[in-house]
């Protein structure tokens, strides 16, 4: 049986960052990562591929709905061509965890794959906003997980973190909740999470019904940029992204060229970082949000 680790979590929560830690643990195993991006240009895959891991990128939609068939075909192909010990699945931040579990339970995949862990990364900095704005949708990722890992909690007051944990426990009383600064997260911690994930509740999934309604305004803008930017120029652009004329920007990420070498940026719900990057790229970026004005966003980066 191929073991499947599913790492879900909202846009920019820290899924790829946590998967990099899992890959450290699996470095001597045959492992394939399936990266599902909502945008048309794959961004995260480059970060993992540069370390020599096998990455399959599925873009332009969510594996839980619009590209479900591609996903099942890809898994069958991976099994046939690579036959790995482990498959790690990173759904888009706006995917439904219940649907992804459903695919592994029902689509004949249960004969060859078994779910090893069901992790949802919870972005502490944005949890309160997300739960207020996206409510039931966001709860699908929390209620159906067996481990909830808080990211970025070191940036909050202890009281704020306690409130988040209380809210998470109310939604999912059985999940194991890990609250630890990720800078101190050891391989042993990751091993314990993956080995001890309790998947006993898989038969009773919570399913968010109004998904298509929620998704109808969700859009992405993918841009290939050959221009060189300085870190300051990118910061100035990102600073403007929270203006309503661009739509509601939830997530932005990209690898760009600058005179100082490769740079990468990460934008999550109004906060951003711009830094030197180890990833060599011709220049590409993706912006995800609600009711985005594609022209205005294109103009910003042109
Ligand atoms: N310091 C710190 N930064 C974090 C932590 N978790 C995530 N980040 C940062 O948050 C940003 C987004 O992290 P990713 O791992 O790309 O998030 P993601 O969930 O894979 O994002 P999408 O796939 O776009 O939805 C990056 O800049 C990370 O470095 C954390 O616990 N601590």
Image (cartoon, rainbow, N blue to C red):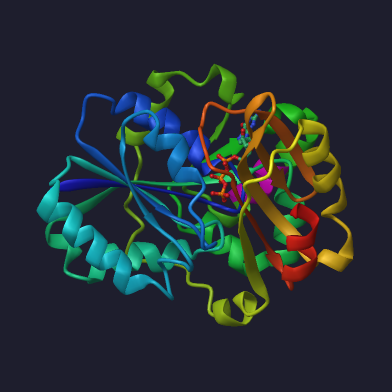
Which of the 4 quarters of the picture holds residue 152? Answer: top right
Query: Can residue 156 be seen at all in this image of the molecule?
Result: no
From the viewer's perspective, is residue 145 above or below residue 259? below
Q: Return the residue nearer the eye: 102 or 177.
A: 102
The answer to whether 167 appears left or right of 172 in the picture is: right
> Where the C terminus falls, by quadrant?
bottom right
The answer to whether 123 appears left or right of 7 in the picture is: right
The answer to whether 102 appears left or right of 231 in the picture is: left
- Answer whether residue 74 is magenta in the image: no
**Residue 110 placement (x, y as % from top left):** 18, 61
Chief SS of the magenta region? helix
From the viewer's perspective, is residue 153 above or below residue 298? above
**Residue 263 placement (x, y as % from top left):** 64, 32
| Residue drawn 68% across the image and 65% down it | 135
- Answer whether residue 168 is magenta in the image: yes
Number of on-image labels? 0
Q: Taking the image as four quarters, which one is ligand 1 found in?
A: top right
Q: Return the residue nearer the eye: 140 or 95.
A: 95
**Residue 69 placement (x, y as % from top left):** 30, 73
Which of the 4 quarters of the picture holds residue 80? Answer: bottom left
| Residue drawn 19% across the image and 63% down it | 109
From the viewer's perspective, is residue 254 above or below residue 78? above
What range is drawn magenta here? 164-169
| Residue drawn 48% across the image and 72% down it | 207
From the viewer's perspective, is residue 221 above or below residue 193? below
**Residue 75 placement (x, y as % from top left):** 23, 59
Query: Can residue 201 be seen at all in this image of the molecule?
Result: yes
Which of the 4 quarters of the picture holds residue 286? Answer: bottom right
């Amino acid at each position: 049986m191929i073991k499947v680790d599913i790492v879900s979590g909202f846009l920019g929560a820290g899924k790829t960052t946590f998967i990099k830690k899992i890959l450290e643990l699996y470095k001597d195993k045959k492992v394939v990562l399936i990266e599902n991006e909502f945008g048309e240009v794959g961004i995260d895959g480059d970060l993992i591929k540069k370390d020599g891991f096998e990455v399959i990128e599925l873009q332009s939609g969510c594996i839980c709905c619009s590209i479900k068939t591609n996903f099942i075909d890809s898994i069958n192909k991976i099994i046939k061509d690579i036959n790995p010990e482990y498959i790690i699945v990173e759904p888009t931040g706006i995917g439904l965890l219940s649907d992804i579990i459903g695919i592994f339970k029902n689509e004949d995949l249960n004969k060859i794959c078994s779910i090893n862990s069901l992790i949802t990364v919870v972005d502490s900095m944005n949890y309160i906003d997300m739960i207020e704005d996206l409510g039931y949708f966001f709860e699908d990722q929390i209620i159906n997980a067996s481990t909830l890992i808080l990211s970025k909690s070191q940036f909050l007051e202890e009281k704020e973190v306690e409130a988040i944990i209380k809210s998470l426990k109310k939604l999912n009383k059985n999940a194991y909740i890990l609250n630890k600064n990720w800078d101190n997260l050891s391989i042993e911690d990751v091993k314990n999470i993956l080995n001890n994930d309790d998947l006993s509740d898989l038969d009773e999934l919570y399913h968010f019904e109004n998904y298509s309604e929620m998704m109808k305004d969700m859009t992405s803008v993918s841009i290939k940029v050959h221009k060189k930017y300085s870190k300051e120029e990118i910061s100035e652009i990102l600073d403007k992204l929270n203006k309503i004329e661009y739509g509601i920007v939830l997530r932005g990420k990209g690898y760009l060229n600058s005179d100082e070498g490769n740079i990468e940026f990460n934008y999550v719900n109004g906060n951003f970082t711009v830094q030197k990057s180890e990833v060599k790229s011709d220049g590409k970026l993706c912006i995800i949000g609600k009711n985005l004005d594609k022209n205005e966003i294109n103009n910003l980066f042109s």
